[in-house]
Amino acid sequence: MNSDILHWLLAQLGPDTDTDDLAARYDRLHSARAVADEVLRERIATLIAEPLKVTVNGVATIDNSANATALERRLEYLQDSRAPDVTEADSLITVQLRARSRR
């Protein structure tokens, strides 16, 4: 994984993300977008595994539903964005074919 990919991943996932973990995932998955996708899905799963909202009457309320929604939006954004390791050869291009006129 080169420095451009690492910087892109840190920009998408936050600067506190473990770079050794990102490098290990990239070696396994061979795609920056797949790494970001996996990390975000793990974060969402961790959030929804616990109650999203906890209230202690008269003391405090903790609501993580907005965090889960933000992570889901980020995941959707990444699906449409272009990762630095995607080359033109990796992109899908559709071309409409037309029959040639016969002489």
Image (tube, rainbow, N blue to C red):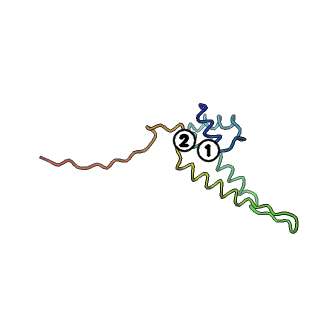
Residue 61: percent from left, percent from top: 81, 63
Residue type pointed to by label 1: Ala
Determine the residue located farthest toward the bottom in the rendered image: 57
Identify the residue under disc 1: 36
Determine the residue located farthest toward the right in the rendered image: 59
Q: Nearer the viewer, residue 52 or 77?
A: 77
Residue type pointed to by label 2: Ala
Q: Residues within 10 Å of mark 1 (few under 14, many from 20)?
A: many
Q: Earlier in the sequence, mark 1 or mark 2?
A: 1
Q: Residue at x 66, y 37 (%)?
A: 22
Identify the residue under disc 2: 83
Q: Quadrant of residue 91?
A: top left
Dot 1: element: helix
Dot 2: element: loop
Q: Quadrant of residue 53?
A: bottom right
Q: Residue at x 63, y 38 (%)?
A: 25
Residue 7: percent from left, percent from top: 62, 37
Numbered circle sitting on residue 95: none
Q: Residues within 10 Å of mark 2 (few under 14, many from 20)?
A: some
Q: Are marks 1 and 2 in contact (CB under 8 Å)?
A: yes
